[in-house]
Amino acid sequence: MGRNGFSLVEERQLPEVGGTARLWRHDATGAELLSVCNADENKCFGVSFRTPPTDSTGVAHILEHSVLCGSERYPVKEPFVELLKGSLQTFLNAFTFPDKTCYPVASANLQDFHNLVDVYLDAVFHPRISEDIFRQEGWHVEAGPDDAPWTYRGVVYNEMKGAYSSPDSVLAEKSQQAVFPDTLYSLDSGGDPERIPDLSYAAFRDFHRRHYQPGNARFFFWGDDPEEARLARIDAELARLEPRGPEAADAADAADAAVPLQKRLDAPRRVVVPYAADPGETRALFTVNWLLGERGDVREALLMEMLEHILEGLPGSPLRQALISSGLGEDTTGCGLETDLRQMYYSTGLKGVKPDDLPRAEALILETLRGLAENGIPAEAVEAAVNSVEFAYRENNSGRFPRGLAAMIQALSTWLYDGDPLAPLAWEAPLAAIKARLAAGEPVFEDALRRHFLDNPHRAHVVLLPDSSLGETRLDAEAARLEALRAAASPERRGALVRETRRLEEAQTTPDSAEALATIPALGLADLPPQNQPLPLTERRLPQTALAHELPTAGIAYVSLLLPVTRLPERLLPLLPLFCRSLTETGTAR
């Protein structure tokens, strides 16, 4: 079946998303579109590209920033700042992952939603990305007319310098790289400040040409907007582009876009790196990391979510409790279960550890896991984990993120690697299978502990040791690099850099023209509902007053109890928040 230039690949009724999901493929370009039709008024759209890096210059991250700096139809410096002035958006942002870049928007107003979609589509496929934009968002040498030292500047460059000054950020990055030493995940897609200045404008433009093309795009829609309009809008946008689907992409492009599997190591490895510490700091940080299975195994991914909850999900969880109560460190660290990459991994550890205590702390993790596997996990912990994960899936509370965005990220966890995008959304069957195994008495989580942790030699120990001179060493190296550039530059080149610096400053301070600003769509009164949507309300006397709101909550009842505290002495009021937390978070024997 074909509609608006698309052919239907698959259609499935999914109670998990409250509607119908259809996977479409664009006939002319090969672009794929996942369309979820349900009753959610908070409509969500996203276009994502597979953007695997080949180095740590941060090109994907810089491009994510740069395409949002004006486009063919919307030639203003910050279209999204202007868009916000006349929008009811519920989400407007972009993300760079280690292997993909996503551009999602959301709104509960249909006209506003279409405005957002139009601006985003033009941004990613027809960005201005001039050399000045590259220099502003990525990096440039700032040169003054006098003999003052040259400096590196750029939005992403400065952002990543901040990230590399944070021990927690460095530990997270180094942990991922240690687990994947042979694949693109061993690179920093955000950008290593020492490598960012290696990126040329030509390479930046070429990255956009190769990756921001229809055959590499994955379009996603969610909500109650008409599906026909979705297909027509994307078809019209793709018609503006030169056909360049998978069959038209050259072999190099196809190879660049691939995300290979990490081959399993047959022995644990250890990585020790310094971090920039304040003078007198003696504490270390560490993680122990395991490579797990592919994210495409939805049942195993769900099982690992439950195991993560068992191990560290609560203050009293056995692994978390063992680490905290050991007194060997100040707090736990590590991302836990990472499911955003092609292969999952698990990371756990401690920060604030004395270097001499590192062997004991690392051994404690393995001893705790071995004890759980051999002695069994308490039944109540298993029940709590299964119930918590199942409740989270049924409630589908994505916090400040729209539910559609959460669904898009889930779908991409298989879709990006040419797997079934609907599999991660259809979680009921995998959940039922796990519960059936537990009901049959199988040691499901004990077996998982042995398979993924104890008997898994692909393990990486990452240690960050304090180095109070590292920050100064990096500054000296940066200054030396810039001084070498300056010394090698001809007088003509130095003058050109001064002019480029001045031109960029002028471009940044020059306001957009009235004609350019007029291109940004904005809502008018006619686009707004004349009345607010009333919430259903029923009032009862029990004899206390009870207010009930009948809303679609997937069968989950939410109760808020409001208790008067007029009889509480004023001197005890500061303790009330602590009492409330204790009442709901502290386990007791009765």
Image: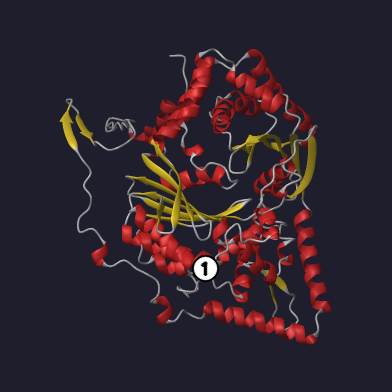
Callout 1: SS: loop
Residue 242 is situated, as x and y percent measured from the top left of the image, at 54, 68
**Residue extending farthest front:** 1
Quarter holding the C terminus is top left
Horizontal placement of 62 versus 454: left or right? left
Horizontal placement of 474 versus 165: left or right? right
Q: Quadrant of residue 519?
A: bottom left
Relative depth, front residue between 309 and 222 = 222
Q: Disc 1 marks which residue?
A: 241
In this orientation, does residue 578 appear?
Answer: no
Residue 352 is situated, as x and y percent measured from the top left of the image, at 69, 38
**Structure colour scheme:** secondary structure
Horizontal placement of 140 versus 473: left or right? left
Q: Residues within 10 Å of mark 1 (few under 14, many from 20)?
A: few
Horizontal placement of 47 versus 571: left or right? right
Residue 131, relative to residue 551: is it above or below? below
Q: Amino acid at mark 1?
A: Leu
In this orientation, does residue 300 appear?
Answer: yes
